[in-house]
């Protein structure tokens, strides 16, 4: 079979043996997989938890080919989506229903021995979800990335009618905007330095967009909201966006850190304490977030046509990474096989 491996200086498609499923696992034939922002960070050597080389592909739609010796919840031919976090199921976090925070967490397609950018892969059956027949392959490929902002919005609390800022109009920022609209958020302002991304955010429901590269971004956002932001979703997670987020949320607001930071940032801790600003991290998702993502896609609250902007076959995976890095695309998919 073919398998993608990302090295420090290149992205290669290599030959490999088809893996055999172990007990409780399934062999899955890949149909399509997305290029995630974390894949781009990792390929540049900037992901804090994914060393190079690595085998990418965690936004995966595939078809069950075979089951291991312990049987399989899904029959051969069933289309599935991967839930890529791989918990130990024994630690304090896992036993309290927070397996996304597992103390021994591994992550399929991110530093794990296998990834979904391959013709075949094996994975524990309990990390698979059946794809409803009414979702096509491209739409199904959005379930995993959409689940990240679904989780973040759920952690933020009730967003209905609230004044909200979304920093960054890349894939996660735009998905966050779509989820906020589905949850009845009030006035939403989106920031991004690129005009094309701001235009897309406006088309998807942002009330106002602001150039993140201008001076006084936080002031512009506060004026557009008519005051401070009740919640700021930082989908960029760099020093400048964190500075802006805290100023927008001052006083009494919440900053949700949704983007993956490449390095440490500093925060004005006296201001955070005295002005009662909440800073909340949001890590991946849980099964209930997958269920909500599927529901949002089923009822058209999120549409693949608004997000999937390019596809490339597996043999042109390096080009897919380049497109995803260009700033001109929202979601780039790598097509691997057919149903």
Image (cartoon, grey):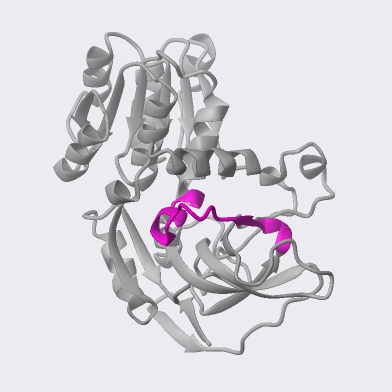
- Residue 213 occupies quadrant: top left
- Residue 49 occupies quadrant: bottom right
The answer to whether residue 212 is seen in the rendering is no
The answer to whether residue 174 is seen in the rendering is yes
Query: Which segment is the magenta one?
Result: 125-144
**Which residue is at a point 57% across and 70% down the rendered structure image?**
63
**Which residue is at a point 63% across and 42% down the rendered structure image?**
286
Rendered view: 157 above or below 147: above
Rendered view: 209 above or below 221: below
Give x and y (percent) for residue 188.
31, 22
Between 43 and 121, the one nearer to me in the picture = 121
Image-based side of 244 in relation to 49, left or right: left
Rendered view: 10 above or below 237: below
Total marks shown come to 0
Give x and y (percent) for residue 291.
58, 41
Image-based side of 316 in relation to 220, left or right: right
**Residue at the left extreme, as displayed:** 195
Give x and y (percent) for residue 175.
38, 40
Between 232 and 89, the one nearer to me in the picture = 89
Give x and y (percent) for residue 17.
61, 89
**Which residue is at a point 41% across and 40% down the rendered structure image?**
237
Q: Report if residue 134 lies within the magenta region.
A: yes
Image-based side of 215 in relation to 256, left or right: left
**Which residue is at a point 47% across and 46% down the rendered structure image?**
260
Between 326 and 84, the one nearer to me in the picture = 84
Image-based side of 276 in relation to 204, left or right: right
Q: Report if residue 326 lies within the magenta region.
A: no
Rendered view: 189 above or below 229: below
């Amino acid at each position: 079979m073919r398998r993608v491996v990302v090295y420090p200086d290149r992205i290669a498609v290599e030959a490999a043996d088809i893996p055999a499923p172990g007990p409780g696992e399934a062999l899955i034939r890949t149909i399509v997989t997305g290029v995630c922002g974390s894949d781009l960070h990792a390929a540049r050597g900037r992901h804090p938890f994914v060393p190079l080389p690595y085998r990418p592909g965690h936004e995966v739609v595939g078809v069950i080919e075979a089951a291991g010796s312990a049987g399989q919840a899904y029959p051969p031919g069933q289309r599935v989506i991967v839930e890529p976090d791989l918990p130990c199921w024994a630690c304090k976090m896992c036993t309290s229903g927070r397996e996304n925070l597992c103390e021994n967490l591994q992550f399929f397609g991110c530093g794990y021995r296998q990834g979904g950018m391959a013709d075949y892969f094996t994975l524990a059956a309990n990390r698979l979800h059946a794809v409803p027949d009414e979702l096509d392959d491209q739409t199904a490929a959005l379930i995993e990335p959409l689940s990240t902002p679904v989780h973040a919005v759920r952690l933020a609390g009730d967003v209905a009618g609230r004044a909200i800022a979304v920093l960054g109009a890349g894939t996660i920022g735009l998905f966050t905007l779509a989820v906020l609209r589905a949850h009845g958020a009030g006035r939403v302002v989106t920031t991004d330095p690129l005009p094309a991304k701001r235009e897309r955010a406006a088309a998807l429901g942002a009330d106002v967009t602001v150039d993140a590269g201008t001076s006084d971004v936080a002031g512009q956002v506060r004026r557009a909201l008519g005051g401070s932001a009740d919640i700021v979703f930082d989908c960029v997670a760099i020093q400048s966006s964190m500075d802006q987020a805290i100023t927008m949320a001052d006083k009494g607001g919440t900053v949700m850190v949704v983007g993956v930071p490449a390095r440490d940032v500093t925060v004005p801790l006296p201001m955070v304490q005295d002005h009662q600003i909440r800073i909340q991290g949001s890590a991946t998702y849980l099964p209930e977030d997958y269920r909500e993502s599927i529901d949002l896609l089923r009822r058209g609250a999120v549409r693949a046509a608004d997000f999937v902007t390019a596809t490339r076959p597996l043999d042109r995976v390096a080009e897919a990474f380049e497109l995803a890095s260009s700033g001109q695309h929202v979601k780039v998919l790598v097509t691997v096989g057919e149903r």
